[in-house]
Image (spheres, helix red, strand yellow):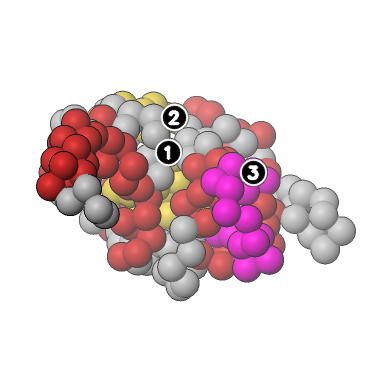
Amino acid sequence: MDKFTTLSSVAAPMPLVNIDTDMIIPKQFLKTIQRSGLGKNLFDEMRYDDDGNEIPEFVLNQPAYRKAQILVAGDNFGCGSSREHAPWALADFGIKAVISTSFADIFYNNCFKNGMLPIVLPQEQVDILMEDARKGENARIAIDLETQTVTSADGQEFGFELDPFKKHCLLNGLDDIGLTLEKVTAIDSFEVQAAQARPWV
């Protein structure tokens, strides 16, 4: 998993509230267990018409936002089912951070396991960043994980809270496998001792 330290990007505005995981990645795309390849189906029912053509009005189809790495979203982002495919699809599209007033708990935790930073801010600060996002290529939002700050296009700085363990994992690019591999020496030592103590196992 890539390390997350700082990020400066155009942000895509998605002011809808209660964007659920079925909107993020519809159920027909859940057959795969691969983390890659789902970006093309992110927000599929909002991005494409029945014939598979892009809907020009949808934010991620607009030229200014095709390479956005930040989403500024409405309240309760990622609600609905617990599918991990939702953060997979966002990450595969290129989204590295989502800013909202609140997230569904399971989606929130799944983000960290996939190298993505969900940031909770008060409504008035999200409103300021949403206005930034609506400016498209004329405004960039900056995120600094070490200092836990988000900076608007005109320099307003907002601090956000974050669990220290989750922060450590993102800064060091550690998912569950990475955390386990940090203990590989201790695991190997235990295996050797266990084999000596119980050779019949």
How far is disc 1 from disc 2 in space, using C-alphas? 10 Å
Disc 3 residue crowd, few under 14, some 14–19, many 20+, Cα 10 Å: few
Dot placed on the residue nearer the N-terminal end, 1 or 2: 2
Residue under label 2: 9
Looking at the rendering, the stretch of residues picked out in magenta corresponds to 24-40
Residue under label 1: 96
Residue 161, image x and y in percent? 16, 48
Point out which mark residue 146 bears. none
| CB within 8 Å, label 1 to label 2 | yes
Mark 1 belongs to which amino acid?
Lys
From this view, report whether residue 82 is shown above or below residue 41. Answer: below
Mark 3 belongs to which amino acid?
Gly
Label 3, secondary structure: give it. loop
The residue lying toward the viewer, choosing from 169 and 196, is 196
Label 1, secondary structure: give it. loop
Q: Residue at x 43, y 54 (%)?
A: 73
The residue lying toward the viewer, choosing from 187 and 201, is 201
Indicate yes or no whether the magenta region holds residue 71. no
How far is disc 3 from disc 2 in space, using C-alphas? 22 Å
